[in-house]
């Protein structure tokens, strides 16, 4: 199963991907997580990516494409993968194509902009478990509150820039995949369980 997950920042891709990969036993490949790990490790790529990420802008295509090609060539991807956050531009989608990577499904998670801002601003993650919480919608246990991470780009200002990038640069890839009959659109508004049920139905 080779899947791509598309949706605006904060649509719930990471939350849903964690559930799906368990079911399909495929790796969850989040380019955002890979960049954050590179930033933390202080690699040259991490340093370059950090400048763009802080501002809510996309990292240049050539950096992302090279990183993803290497990752999906690893043995754990032989039976499939779930790509979350890639491709995010038409050139990235074309590069995947040119590399001969065939896809089974492109899931598009739809949530409107105003709800996105509140999901992003309240997002917190647990660096120890990788669990994603939300201060109101999925409150963390009080005892782990002090170790939770609030991403630098999860401010209202950077979120608005990221939403702009989504509408201008990422949403044009939906017609690209629609032309191949790969797209399944899922309403991302509702509880995480409701959204999982819709995704399961769309994949059936
Ligand atoms: P993405 O990976 O698309 O950026 P996340 O999965 O990180 O999105 O979710 C963004 C924020 O919204 C997180 O704080 C998460 O807990 C919360 N969230 C995810 N799904 C839902 C949902 N169905 N309803 C309410 N909040 C949600
Ligand atoms: P979210 O789902 O909340 O938008 P991600 O974790 O997917 O966030 O991405 C965080 C940041 O990492 C993006 O704003 C961008 O700077 C960078 N990034 C991640 N994936 C890509 C990509 N495919 N192309 C360009 N930049 C990317």
Image (cartoon, rainbow, N blue to C red):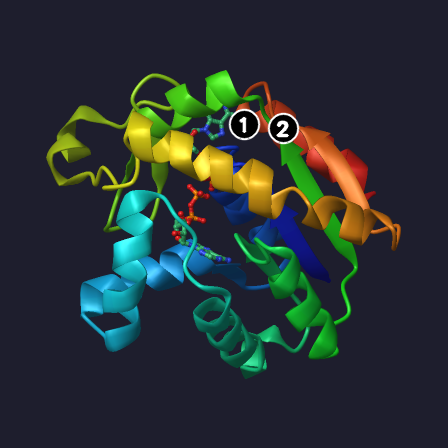
In the rendered image of this protein, does residue 175 appear above or below residue 164? below
Q: In x, y percent, where is residue 62?
A: 49, 72
Quadrant, the N terminus: bottom right
| Residue occupying image coordinates x 87% and y 51% | 179
Q: In x, y percent, where is residue 72?
A: 57, 75
Element on which disc 1 rests: helix
Residue nearest the viewer, comparing 101 with 136: 101
Q: In x, y percent, where is residue 105?
A: 77, 53
In the rendered image of this protein, does residue 86 appear above or below residue 18? below
Image quarter of residue 184: top right
| Residue occupying image coordinates x 58% and y 18% | 190
Asked whether the viewer can see residue 9, the reply is no
Q: What number is the disc on residue 5?
A: none
Asked whether the viewer can see residue 25, the reply is yes
Quadrant, the C terminus: top right
Residue indicated by mark 2? 195
- Extreme-left residue of the structure: 146
How many badges with numbers are in the image? 2
Circle 2 Cα neighbour tier, 10 Å, few/some/many (<14 / 14–19 / ≥20): some
Whether disc 1's CB lies below 8 Å from ligand 1 is answered yes
Residue indicated by mark 1? 192
Query: Given contact means CB atoms under 8 Å apart, are the residues at marks 2 and 1 in contact?
Result: yes
Residue nearest the viewer, comparing 43 with 125: 43
Q: Give the side of residue 76 with respect to residue 182, left or right.
A: left
| Residue occupying image coordinates x 48% and y 34% | 163
């Amino acid at each position: 199963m080779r899947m791509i997950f598309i949706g605006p920042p904060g649509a719930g891709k990471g939350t849903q991907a964690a559930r799906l990969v368990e079911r399909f036993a495929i790796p969850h490949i989040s380019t955002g997580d890979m960049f954050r790990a590179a930033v933390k490790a202080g690699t040259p790529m991490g340093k370059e990516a950090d400048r763009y990420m802080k501002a809510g802008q996309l990292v240049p295509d050539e950096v992302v494409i090279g990183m993803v090609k290497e990752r999906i060539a690893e043995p754990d991807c032989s039976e499939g993968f779930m790509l979350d956050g890639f491709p995010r531009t038409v050139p990235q989608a074309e590069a995947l194509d040119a590399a001969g990577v065939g896809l089974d499904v492109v899931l598009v998670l739809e949530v409107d902009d105003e709800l996105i801002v509140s999901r992003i601003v309240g997002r917190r993650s647990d660096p120890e478990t990788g669990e994603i919480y939300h201060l109101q919608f999925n409150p963390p246990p009080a005892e782990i509150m002090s170790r939770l991470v609030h991403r630098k780009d999860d401010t209202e200002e950077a979120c608005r820039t990221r939403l702009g990038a989504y509408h201008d640069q990422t949403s044009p890839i939906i017609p690209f995949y629609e032309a191949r009959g790969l797209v399944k659109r899922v309403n991302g508004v509702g509880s995480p369980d409701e959204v999982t049920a819709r995704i399961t139905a769309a994949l059936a």
